[in-house]
Amino acid sequence: MFYPMLEGLLSRTLLPKTRKGLLLISTCRNSHKFSSVIDVAMISEKKMGSLLFPFQGLEKYLMGGVNKSHFHAFLPSFEDIKSAEAFFTPSKRHSIDYYSSAVRMDHAPVISEPEVCFIGRSNVGKSSLIKALFSLVPDIEVRVSKTPGHTKKMNFFMVKKAFTLVDMPGYGFKAPKDFEDMVEPYLKTRKNLRRTFLLIDGSVGVQKADRIALDMCEEFGIPYVIVVTKIDKAKQGELLRHILEMQNIIEDHTTGCFPQPFLVSSVQFSGIHLLRCFIAHVTGNLPLRLT
């Protein structure tokens, strides 16, 4: 697959003079060395392509008969990705912070802005992924624990007036006893929910609890997307097998799932910029340029 937005990219001048927030990210305590696309643009074009579009490094190993089109259903330009980063970069006029928590829907904050939620098995890397998405935000409190099931409440993160991101409790091992009473009413009744992000561990593939979560999203008729986490933890062949299994499930057994699974690694920062761009787009904040 050819990614035209990367051709000749390194010959451009990519440091914007007016977006000071992007130039100060090295001072952020949460910052990863690839937190900003400015830093990504400094590496080789091949590595940059694999970092921004992780599937690019895998598709050459797929057999010729595999339908690859769904893996490119969302293919923004580099300029789109740069524009999306602004929504994840705080400034005096654009605050990003933890907002509140809730254990029941009647405790949830009343918010009119578009909302996205992240849900997945305990220990799928959900909090680590959210921390990576907000890595340009100094001192934001996204608690990450080595103990599965650390998140026990619905945690709301407010991105000014652009959107709200909700970190949901994990299901499966060590899930809160009232998980169903907490999560199901939210998914059923949250009117401003624009997209549910269902996280699946790429190192182990789809588990029984994940299939139950998929069925739940289908039953509620909500738009959702699969995010494949921990792609750095799996061997290449194993990861490809798991991805193709997920793709088959999406094609044959779902109607509300976005056709493209998003591959991410919170450790290597692979796919984080693309996921930021998708969030900005589905919340209505970022119309994509024609490429």
Image (spheres, helix red, strand yellow):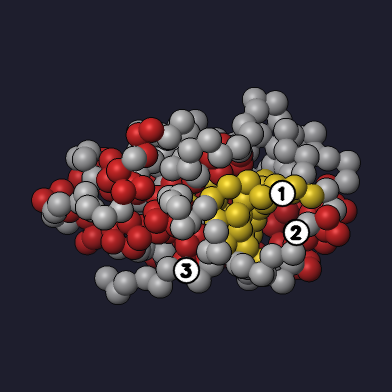
Which numbered dot is residue 100? 1
Q: Residue furthest front?
A: 92
The answer to whether residue 16 shows anywhere in this view is: yes
Asked if 28 appears above or below 243 in the picture, the reply is above
What residue lies at 45% left-to-right and 52% top-to-bottom? 92
Residue bearing the label numbered 2: 109
Nearest to N terminus: mark 1 or mark 3: 1
Task: Give the alpha-carbon distance from disc 1 to disc 3, as whole Å.
Answer: 23 Å
Q: Amino acid at mark 2?
A: Pro
Residue bearing the label numbered 3: 285
What residue lies at 88% left-to-right and 46% top-to-bottom? 178
What residue lies at 41% left-to-right and 64% top-to-bottom? 74
Q: Residues within 10 Å of mark 2 (few under 14, many from 20)?
A: few
Q: Amino acid at mark 1?
A: Ser
Element marked by disc 2: loop
Element marked by disc 3: loop
Q: Residues within 10 Å of mark 1 (few under 14, many from 20)?
A: some
Q: Position of residue 27 (x, y in %)?
A: 38, 33
Mark 2 or 3: in front is 2
Asked if 43 appears above or below 211 in the picture, the reply is above
**Which of these two is toward me, 122 or 234?**
122
Q: Position of residue 247 (x, y in %)?
A: 53, 57
Nearest to N terminus: mark 2 or mark 3: 2
82 displayed left or right of 130: left
**Which of these two is toward me, 8 or 231?**
8
What residue lies at 55% left-to-right and 56% top-to-bottom? 159
Task: Give the alpha-carbon distance from disc 2 to disc 3, as whole Å.
Answer: 21 Å
CB atoms of marks 2 and 1 within 8 Å: yes
